[in-house]
């Protein structure tokens, strides 16, 4: 029962994230070298500079989201094998960045920010 409940919770939590909000948050963290780069409600919770791996992960998310958008909506855009392999390598590197950044306090704040960005203004 426990694993089924965990899977159900994970599925629901995953659906709480929207790509547009995630891209907005990641755009800020990608510039995370100082407190002015992130939402005013979040800045006091973070340690600066934000870890390079977390900034790179955020930058890569934005970049990959733009590629996905181009692939879905830009009918004139062509993706060549060499370019797709580079995109795949960037995604793989982002997973490695997450593995390194995940144990940090900033990573925990980042995850909460991804999910609750719209709610911060009510605090």
Image: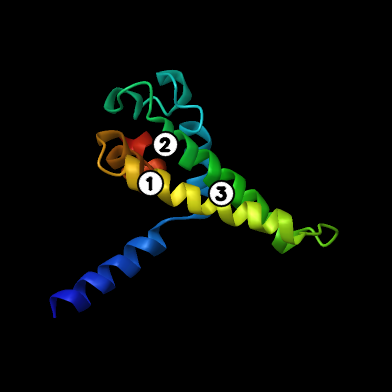
Q: Residue 42: x, y in percent?
A: 34, 30
Task: Give the class, few, some or many, for how many residues have Cα within 10 Å of label 1's Cα (few <14, many ≥20).
Answer: some
Quarter of the figure with residue 9 = bottom left
Going 38% across and 21% down the picture, which residue do you hit?
49
Marks 2 and 1, Cα distance to the nearest angstrom? Answer: 7 Å
Q: Residue 5: x, y in percent?
A: 20, 74
At numbered mark 3, what does the secondary structure look like: helix, strand or loop?
A: helix
Q: Badge 1 is on which residue?
A: 98
The count of marks equals 3
Q: Residue 45: x, y in percent?
A: 27, 28
At numbered mark 2, what does the secondary structure look like: helix, strand or loop?
A: helix
Going 37% across and 49% down the picture, which residue do you hit?
115
Contact, mark 2 vs mark 1 (Cβ under 8 Å): yes
Q: Residue 52: x, y in percent?
A: 42, 31
Q: Badge 3 is on which residue?
A: 90
Marks 1 and 3, Cα distance to the nearest angstrom? Answer: 12 Å
Tell me the quadrant of the picture where the N terminus can be found: bottom left
* 17 left or right of 72 in image: left
At numbered mark 1, what does the secondary structure look like: helix, strand or loop?
A: helix
Q: Is residue 70 above or below residue 6?
A: above
**Residue 49 in view here:** yes
Q: Badge 2 is on which residue?
A: 53
């Amino acid at each position: 029962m426990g694993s089924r409940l965990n899977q159900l919770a994970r599925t629901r939590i995953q659906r709480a994230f929207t790509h547009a909000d995630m891209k907005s948050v990641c755009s800020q963290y990608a510039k995370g070298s100082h407190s002015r780069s992130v939402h005013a409600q979040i800045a006091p919770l973070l340690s600066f500079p934000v870890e390079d791996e977390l900034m790179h992960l955020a930058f890569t998310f934005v970049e990959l989201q733009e590629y996905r958008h181009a692939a879905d909506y830009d009918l004139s855009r062509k993706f060549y094998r060499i370019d797709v392999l580079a995109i795949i390598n960037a995604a793989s590197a982002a997973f490695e960045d997450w593995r390194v950044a995940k144990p940090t306090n900033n990573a925990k704040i980042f995850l909460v920010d991804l999910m609750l960005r719209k709610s911060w203004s009510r605090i």
